[in-house]
Amino acid sequence: MKEITTSAIIYRIYKYSDRSAVAMAFSPEFGKFKLFMPRAYSSKSGFMTFIPGTVTFQMKDNSDLHKFISFAHEPSYYPYTQTPDIIMRLHLLFDFFDHLYAVGQGCKVFWQLCLKFDEGNYRKVLLYSIYRLLIDSGVNFHLACSRCGADSGDMTLIGGELFCTKCGRHDKRAIAISGGALERLQTFADNDKFRETEFDRDEELELLAIFNSHIDSVLGKAGVLKSYNVFMEVV
Ligand SMILES: [Zn+2]
């Protein structure tokens, strides 16, 4: 068993017994990983999730569940937990992450994006981060009609393929994508345009609804992302 210290975010803690817990973590070095915390509930204040920092743990060779030793939060990210607009979005973002990645997977770009949230950019960073997660995990969709190649106007997304209004067909799984939403999705692949693009609340919610329905369609069940419903209720 070797002891490892590395950058990480602990994004979820499951109570395991009166005192112990299992934590879900993400690090640029190890991707998604699990930690057993023998004394998670010994301090009264609880553990602050979503704040980037440095974790120390014992890596088990014969198990996915490694033993937590300590975590040092990076104080410059304390504003994350004090800003509801950011913490709500991190909950949602890591729900996407958790469903799209297996243990041992995760990308460095996602780590960099997790460090970028501030009070002025949280909508933009959230949407771009989800877009990158979809690409990196291989479940993104091509942003043009899969029949005729049209790349503007209203579309429907069916089974991970986009169809324009001429080529589309009736399908109960169809996810509507307005011409405006398509245009904003396309800016994600264009650095210059993306830098100038701002997302207001309605635009953010429209894209989140598309991403959420897409995840349900990819994973073949409805309501996969529990934090999406919570987010929609409070945003
Ligand atoms: Zn078409």
Image (cartoon, grey):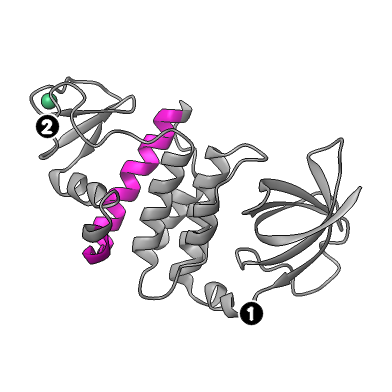
Mark 1 and mark 2 residues within 8 Å of each other at the beta carbon: no
Residue 125 visible in image: yes
Marks 1 and 2 sit apart, C-alpha to C-alpha, by: 48 Å
- Which residue is located at x 48 percent, y 63 percent? 88
**Residue stretch rendered in magenta on the structure:** 194-218
Q: How many marks?
A: 2
- Structural crowding at the residue carrying mark 1, measured as other residues with C-alpha within 10 Å and reported as few (<14), some (14–19) or many (≥20): few
Q: Which amino acid does label 1 sit on?
A: Pro
Residue 150 circle label: 2
State yes or no: residue 203 in magenta: yes
Residue 232 visible in image: no
- Which residue is located at x 18 percent, y 48 percent? 183
Q: Nearer the viewer, residue 24 or 213?
A: 24
165 up-or-down from 93: above or below: above
Relative placement, left or right, of 69 versus 203 is: right
Q: Is the magenta stretch mostly helix, strand or loop?
A: helix
Q: Which of 10 and 43 is in front in this view?
A: 10
Task: Give percent across and percent down for residue 235.
Answer: 38, 63
- Which residue is located at x 24 percent, y 52 percent? 187
Residue 75 circle label: 1
Cβ of disc 2 within 8 Å of ligand 1? yes
Local secondary structure at mark 2: loop
14 up-or-down from 54: above or below: above
Relative placement, left or right, of 148 versus 198 is: left
Question: Quadrant for ligand 1?
Answer: top left
Task: Give percent across and percent down for residue 171.
Answer: 24, 21
Compare marks 1 and 2 and give the one earlier in the sequence: 1
Relative placement, left or right, of 95 versus 75 is: left
Q: What residue type is labelled 2?
A: Ala
Task: Give percent across and percent down for residue 209.
Answer: 33, 45
Dividing the picture into quadrants, the one containing residue 81 is bottom right
